[in-house]
Image: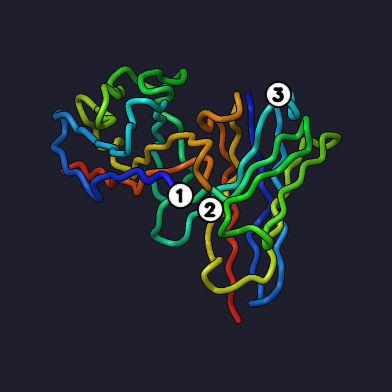
Amino acid sequence: QVQLLQSGAEVKKPGSSVKVSCKAFGDTFSSYTFSWVRQAPGQGLEWMGRIIPIFGTSKYAQRFQGRVTITADDSTSTTYMELRSLRSEDTAVYYCARDPYGGTSFDFWGQGTLVTVSS
Amino acid sequence: SYVLTQPPSVSVAPGQTARITCGGNNIGNKSVHWYQQKPGQAPVLVVFDDTDRPSGIPERISGSNPGNTATLTISRVEAGDEADYYCQVWDASSDHLYVFGTGTKVTVL
């Protein structure tokens, strides 16, 4: 059974950075595409970016361009999302999610990581 | 950027049918996927490619996308169906490759 296990909750100061990890269990890691999706309190889902581990290529939503980096380590089946220059509006739950075919739906999701940005 | 519009809320009595719509430009030309999200939990895929269900999703939950509007239908609604539901499409020409709808809160009366 596929599982995506994310790192724990974080509390950060404005202007700092956060790096969240997502480790995949139960299937071939590099065959899939992994995205990061965030959800601010009481709000909807917003796609931030994705990585295709087999190619090592990433693409980001424009509003996060320059502030976010998504990477993958095939040896540990882990994808990472680093968000820099944090502001209070970045307080949200961050999810990793797997797209099995690249350009379709998300069939498995991580449990979510709450990132709180507060002075 | 591509926009998907959903009603903010739908209320339905137990045993009745809930229908959640998802509107977007030429949405009939796209594959629509649906997620259920309960409070404090990650989203769960309930319908993919307009009409298909992942294993473990009951037949009471179905999807359609005949042209102008995609619809998620929940028949014989149960208390456990109370959740937020999001539609999603892939749009290679959009800034957000994966576009989510605005979300619909389903309340079971």
What amino acid is labelled 3 in the image?
Asp
Secondary structure beneath label 2: strand
The residue positioned 27% from the left and 25% from the top of the image is B67
Q: For the residues carrying marks 2 and 3, which lies nearer the camera in this image?
A: 2
Q: Earlier in the sequence, mark 2 or mark 3?
A: 3
For residue B75, above or below residue B41: above
Q: CA distance from mark 2 to mark 1?
A: 6 Å
Q: Nearer the viewer, residue B29 or B90?
A: B29
Residue density around tag 1, few if under 14, some if 14–19, many if 20 or more, within 10 Å:
many
Subunit ID for the residue under disc 1: A
The image position of residue B97, as x and y in percent, is 53, 41
Subunit ID for the residue under disc 3: A
The answer to the question of whether label 2 and label 1 lie on touching residues, with beta carbons closer than 8 A, is yes
- Mark carried by residue A45: 1
In the displayed image of the protein, which residue is found farthest to the front?
A: B93
Secondary structure beneath label 3: loop
For residue A91, above or below residue A107: below
The image position of residue A11, as x and y in percent, is 64, 69
Q: Which residue is mark 3?
A: A27
What amino acid is labelled 2 in the image?
Arg
Q: Which residue is mark 2?
A: A38
Quadrant hosting residue A110? top right
Residue B43 vs residue A72: left or right? left
The image position of residue B78, as x and y in percent, is 24, 32
The residue positioned 66% from the left and 55% from the top of the image is A8
What amino acid is labelled 1 in the image?
Leu
